[in-house]
Image (cartoon, rainbow, N blue to C red):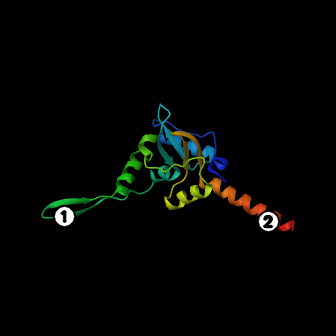
Amino acid sequence: MKVRDLMRTPVITVPPTARVAEVAKLMVENHASGLPVIDEDGALVGLVTQEDVVAKHAKVHVPTYLGILGYALPFTSQDSDDDIRRILAVTAADLMTDRFVTIAPDRDVDEAATAMVDKHANPLPVVENETLVGIISRTDILRLVLAEEEDGDQDARNV
């Protein structure tokens, strides 16, 4: 099965200027695990996930410092910088990640599932010719697994 057979369209998107509360509301109302962020030219510029929104209310991991000869050297990580960025976020642009995984519609669903597991990516924007054409999430793959299991059970009963 191909990604295009399972992806959802139309895709609910937000502009970079969308307020965090608006993003959260759209996620809840549409049972979305993430929303692509689209700029005024229609380009995919980021992705805001449920994890990003929830992290806004999580405890921040404060950077540690090492004192050497009267100097304080910070040991910060990308994680602590991301935590601080999320807590201070006001808009989708503040909250989104611009390091996200996409997939083409003609790829196998197994490749989408592999990307989700290996790269901890959910959802995956589906992009064709640099244009957002759909979105696929873990929930979509769960629905496929359920349908396959139900079909298998039905076939076993018919034997």
Percent of width and height locating residue 34:
54, 48
Q: Residue furthest left?
A: 69
Where residue 35 sits, quadrant-wise, is top right
Residue located at (73% from left, 58% from top): 147
Amino acid tagged 2? Asp
Percent of width and height locating residue 87:
41, 49
Residue located at (55% from left, 40% from top): 132
* Mark in the foreground, 1 or 2: 2
Q: Which disc, if any, is residue 131?
A: none
Contact (Cβ within 8 Å) of mark 1 with mark 2: no
Amino acid tagged 1? Gly
| Residue wearing tag 1 | 67
| Residue wearing tag 2 | 153
* 58 relative position to 30: left or right: left
Q: Quadrant of the N terminus?
A: bottom right
Of helix, strand and loop, which one carries label 1? strand
Q: Earlier in the sequence, mark 1 or mark 2?
A: 1
Q: Quadrant of the C terminus?
A: bottom right
Of helix, strand and loop, which one carries label 2? helix
* 145 relative position to 153: left or right: left
* 128 relative position to 79: left or right: right
Against 105, is 148 above or below?
A: below
Camera-nearest residue between 2 and 72:
2
